[in-house]
Image (tube, rainbow, N blue to C red):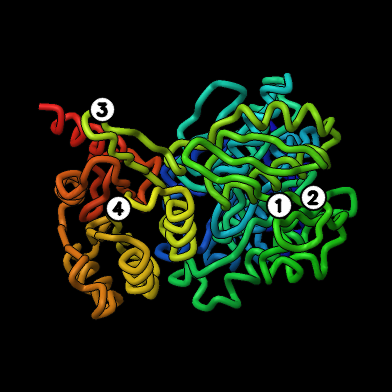
Amino acid sequence: MANLQDLLKSYQPTQLLGPTNPELSALTMDSRQAGPGVAFFAIRGTVRDGHDYIDAAVAQGVSAVFCEKQPENAPEHVTFVVVPNAAEAMGYVAAEFYGNPSQKLKLVGVTGTNGKTTCVTLLHKLFRDLGYNAGLLSTVQNQINETVIPATHTTPDAITLQALLAQMVKAGCTHAFMEVSSHALVQHRVTGVQFTGAVFTNITHDHLDYHGTFDEYIRAKKLFFDGLTKKAFALVNADDKRSMVMLQNTKADKKTYALRKEADFKARLLDNSIQGLQLELEGQEVWFRLIGTFNAYNILAVYGSAVLLGEDPQEVLASLSNLTSAAGRFDYVVSAADQITGIVDYAHTPDALENVLQTIAQIRKPEQKVITVVGCGGNRDAAKRPVMADIAARLSDRVILTSDNPRHEDPQEILNQMQVGVKAADLKKALSVVDRKEAIKTAVLLAQPDDIILVAGKGHETYQEVKGERSPFDDKQVLQEAFALLQK
């Protein structure tokens, strides 16, 4: 329980109507969960406006309503808290309600187009290996120590986020690592959260369906660093040309990592194979189980973060060298019959797809052919569809365009938009198979012994969303089933 006045310590409302200090036992942004002792936040979303559900919340017996405009005929027994931005208010109020848990943790957030999940997963594994109680908030899953909590968003809403952080504190966690998406920053999901450190991996073409322009996407990411305190650190990838933009207005301690430029944390790539990476880091050669140049950057980001959190560099390197990546990130299986390597990767942006295919090009043998299965999600940034098809066709020996999560769009129309990007010279090596399972099976049938199949786009996801309905679908499982058929 908490009284309203205590929850408004760090946020000043425009107006307060009705009882001035009700006792509150819960917070919600869902009118169906409203009731006595509950505060309802009328959030303006991209599809629905929470203000349209105020009457429903009142009918449920809600005690307080946070809204952006004074309601007409407001019932006297309900407290109406009028605020400039209900989402922002929810962030600050949720933090107070749950006892400001982020202030009791060493919390590091990772933002960027690619690499977020791998970085936070590695950080969580690393600090667990170093003996700490630690929490994880990622696209794949949330974790409190080893207890897994399913994730529904890259970054949860402010109420869920603060509740999870509070659970971590209660479980004795000293550290926590979380992905911070551009949507979350714009929608105030991390408002009220105090970060010990922030990491910027890179920024490329993504989420323009939401942000509208690339400049707005960059601005959204930059909000994260602008909000840091001088006690925090800001660690950015100096090899990304937009990294310095992130640091322009931050009060945090500015640090960099890089493979090519001079940086506070720098490594040199010595070897890159299907077995792993060898880097020269801190003046010594270290072997890592992760694969690909993009993972060399992830390793640097994780290493730099750990050192900035006060950990011993040698202990960090020793632990990091034994860690594996997140599920669905360059996750590979090999067929017993023909030694065909199948790689499942979440690459769903042009840059991520190009990185994975370039990594495969670096580690494959001259005689190995690369077959790529790739699709693009529905109801998302359509501009990247022809770009991704072009990248897949250009950097593969064969490409099969297929469905990803069509959602509410026509799968064939998505493929038509992708096909536009395939250049005339590459048309002969491109196929279109709408059914994703059939596309993966086709790739396996086309593969010769020792070839490499990349199944890109869905990675860790264990479902496929078609016409708004989710059905079980696991790329890795389908790939393994297709490999098993080769042995029969």
Left or right? Give the position of 431 relative to 342.
left
Q: What is the x, y in percent for residue 364? A: 41, 49
Residue 265, labelled with which disc?
A: 2
How far apart are the alpha carbons under marks 4 and 3? 18 Å
How far apart are the alpha carbons under marks 4 and 1? 36 Å
Label 4 sits on residue: 369
Taking the spot 69% from the left edge, 42% from the top edge, the residue there is 302
How far apart are the alpha carbons under marks 2 and 4? 36 Å
- Depth check: give the residue in front, 282 or 53: 282
Badge 2 density bin: few <14, some 14–19, many ≥20, Cα 10 Å? many
The amino acid type of the residue labelled 4 equals: Lys
Judging from the image, what secondary structure is the residue with disc 2 in?
A: strand
Query: Sequence order check: which comes first, mark 2 or mark 4?
Result: 2
Taking the spot 71% from the left edge, 50% from the top edge, the residue there is 268
The quadrant of the image that shows the N terminus is: top right
How far apart are the alpha carbons under marks 2 and 3? 41 Å
Q: Are marks 4 and 1 in contact (CB under 8 Å)?
A: no
Q: Quadrant of residue 25?
A: top right
Residue 336, labelled with which disc?
A: 3
The amino acid type of the residue labelled 1 equals: Val
Q: What is the x, y in percent for residue 426? A: 25, 73
Q: Are marks 3 and 1 in contact (CB under 8 Å)?
A: no
Query: Sequence order check: which comes first, mark 2 or mark 3?
Result: 2
Badge 3 density bin: few <14, some 14–19, many ≥20, Cα 10 Å? few
